């Protein structure tokens, strides 16, 4: 492009490869040779034309280079935005670093993360039940809130019963960070054979504010050895005098009874103690696990649901899935419309909003996309997607990243078309997909080692393979980092 902003016509002279006779100044009265003007600047015009063409090529290269710089900056901005989302992992670079080792005597279960801080129920240093937050970069306690008095540790290591969970509503959205954790804490011990009955002193429901690090509410409730936390209610499980399992739902804030359910069948003769009572949570449903292997669920009003499947996530299930005769499953999600899907619904661990309302399910050999609000099927794909534990997906920049047993699969979020796939040269995938912005990664395992496999998010090309420490037996994502463990040894890597 000309610097003055204008374009000028250029006339190119063709000589068919013959530059013609040498240029000699004409004598007075001579006619100029045929085909020549007799102006001494004519050959310089050809050279000037070549210079202009060369300048145009250089200018074009500069423009293309400038366009590439703009594209690179846009890509970097997108990567940075994705890396700042809840659920994103850290870019570990070329090597995994052992950040800190979890002491074997620390009783702490991280349930959720806020940035680089992990939060969960814990037994504090003085033996009290509480909620503790640790900085995942250093392992130091960022804050803690006691919610019960100290418990004297028994000979067998029993320290009481502590169950916590965030309110289940909106937990399907990975960008939702809960601001409260509801806990049931008690020193009531199941009267299992061979255990000495303890002096029961308390059983209470406590709500902990995760923003102010204070107790929002605390109320004493009936003493029970088992509980399931569902948000605005807590279900307490116990045996009545006739050895029937009884579930009582109490209000989180007041402790008032909401509803009560009594199993019509007594426990088998061999299950004659309260240790046979086991409860869990699946969204806003209570799971009751029977002593002989049978299980059922109780809805928010105490209605019984049989034939369920709990699609697990964290310590409890994220939702309840009820199979139908046609092979589909009705997924009951707290605070959202029921969703009828093929296969198992995958949990979104990161979502940048580029495919609004998309939910993904898989049977292992086929994958589907669903509209979360209307329940309509958006697409069906023959792409295989599977996981050794819980199927998860990352939604980023209009793409769905997920795992197969042998590697990583990336689909178009609009159509389900396969955009790229990566298969491990050996071994299997051990975790769901993690994303740090420019990369997606999984932990793989062979007979010899575990490794972090890092891929380019856009192309699927292998960026690097980073071995985990040799003693590691298993690993999974912990917030933006990786928790690696073997036996009673656990280390946070980043």
Image (spheres, grey):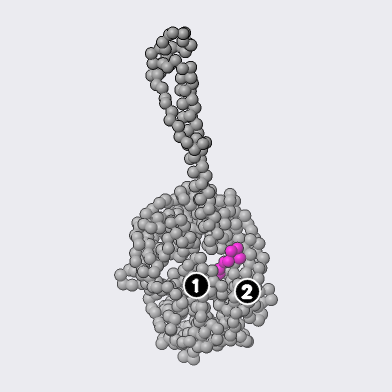
Where does residue 268 sit, x and y in percent of width and height?
Answer: 44, 84
Q: Residue at x 39, y 16 (%)?
A: 35
Residue 116 covered by magenta stretch: yes
Q: CA distance from mark 2 to mark 1?
A: 25 Å
Few, some or many C-alpha atoms within 10 Å of disc 1 (few <14, some 14-19, many ≥20)?
A: some
Q: Residue at x 47, y 57 (%)?
A: 396
Residue closest to the eye, 259 or 193: 259
Q: What secondary structure is marked by label 2?
A: loop
Q: What label does residue 212 carry, if any?
A: 2
Image height of 121 relative to 352, above or below: below
Q: Which residue is mark 1?
A: 316
Residue closest to the eye, 161 or 132: 132
Residue 325 covered by magenta stretch: no
Image height of 233 relative to 11, above or below: below
Where does residue 433 sit, x and y in percent of width and height?
Answer: 48, 58
- Figure quadrant of residue 356: bottom left
Q: What secondary structure is marked by label 1?
A: strand
Q: Residue at x 46, y 87 (%)?
A: 259
Mark closest to the chain's N terminus, 2 or 1: 2
Q: Residue at x 48, y 25 (%)?
A: 48
Image height of 10 relative to 75, above or below: above
Q: Which residues are magenta?
A: 111-117
Q: Is residue 373 left or right of residue 473?
A: left
> Is residue 387 visible in this depiction of the protein?
no
Where does residue 370 sit, x and y in percent of width and height?
Answer: 37, 64
């Amino acid at each position: 492009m000309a610097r003055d902003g204008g374009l000028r016509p250029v006339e190119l002279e063709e000589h068919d490869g013959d530059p013609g006779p040498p240029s000699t100044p004409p004598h007075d009265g001579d006619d100029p040779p045929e085909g020549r003007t007799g102006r001494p600047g004519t050959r310089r015009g050809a050279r000037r034309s070549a210079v202009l063409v060369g300048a145009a090529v250089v200018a074009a290269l500069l423009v293309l280079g400038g366009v590439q710089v703009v594209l690179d900056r846009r890509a970097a901005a997108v990567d940075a935005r994705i890396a700042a989302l809840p659920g994103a992992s850290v870019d570990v670079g070329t090597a995994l670093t052992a950040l800190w080792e979890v002491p074997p005597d620390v009783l702490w279960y991280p349930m959720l993360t806020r940035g680089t801080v992990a939060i969960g129920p814990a037994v504090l240093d003085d033996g009290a039940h509480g909620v503790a937050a640790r900085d995942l970069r250093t392992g130091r306690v960022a804050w803690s809130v006691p919610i019960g008095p100290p418990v004297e540790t028994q000979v067998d290591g029993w320290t009481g019963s502590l169950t916590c969970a965030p309110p289940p509503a909106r937990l399907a959205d990975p960008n939702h960070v809960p601001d409260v954790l509801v806990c049931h804490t008690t020193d009531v011990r199941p009267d299992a054979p061979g255990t000495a009955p303890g002096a029961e002193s308390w059983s209470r429901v406590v709500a902990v504010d995760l923003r102010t690090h204070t107790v929002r509410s605390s109320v004493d409730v009936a003493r029970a050895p088992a509980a399931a936390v569902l948000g605005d209610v807590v279900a307490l499980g116990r045996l009545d005098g006739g050895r029937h399992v009884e579930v009582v739902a109490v209000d989180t804030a007041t402790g008032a009874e909401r509803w009560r359910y009594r199993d019509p069948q007594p426990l088998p003769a061999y299950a004659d103690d309260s240790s046979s009572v086991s409860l869990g949570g699946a969204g806003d449903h209570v799971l009751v696990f029977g002593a002989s292997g049978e299980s059922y669920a109780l809805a928010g009003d105490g209605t019984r649901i049989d034939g369920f499947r709990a699609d697990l996530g964290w310590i409890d299930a994220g939702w309840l899935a009820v199979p139908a005769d046609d092979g589909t499953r009705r997924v009951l999600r707290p605070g959202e419309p029921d969703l009828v899907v093929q296969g198992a619904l995958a949990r979104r661990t990161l979502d940048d909003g580029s495919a609004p309302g998309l939910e993904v399910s898989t049977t292992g050999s086929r994958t589907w996309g669903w509209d979360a609000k209307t329940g309509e099927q958006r697409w069906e794909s023959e792409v295989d997607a599977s996981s050794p534990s819980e199927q998860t997906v990352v939604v980023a920049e209009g793409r769905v990243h997920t795992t197969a047993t042998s590697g990583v699969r990336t689909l178009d979020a609009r159509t389900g078309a396969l955009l790229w796939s990566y298969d491990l040269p050996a071994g299997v995938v051990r975790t769901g997909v993690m994303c740090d912005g420019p990369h997606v990664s999984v932990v793989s395992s062979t007979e010899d080692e575990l490794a972090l496999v890092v891929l380019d998010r856009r192309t699927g090309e292998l960026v690097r393979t980073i071995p985990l420490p040799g003693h590691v037996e298993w690993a999974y994502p912990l917030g933006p980092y990786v928790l690696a463990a073997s036996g009673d040894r656990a280390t946070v890597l980043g």
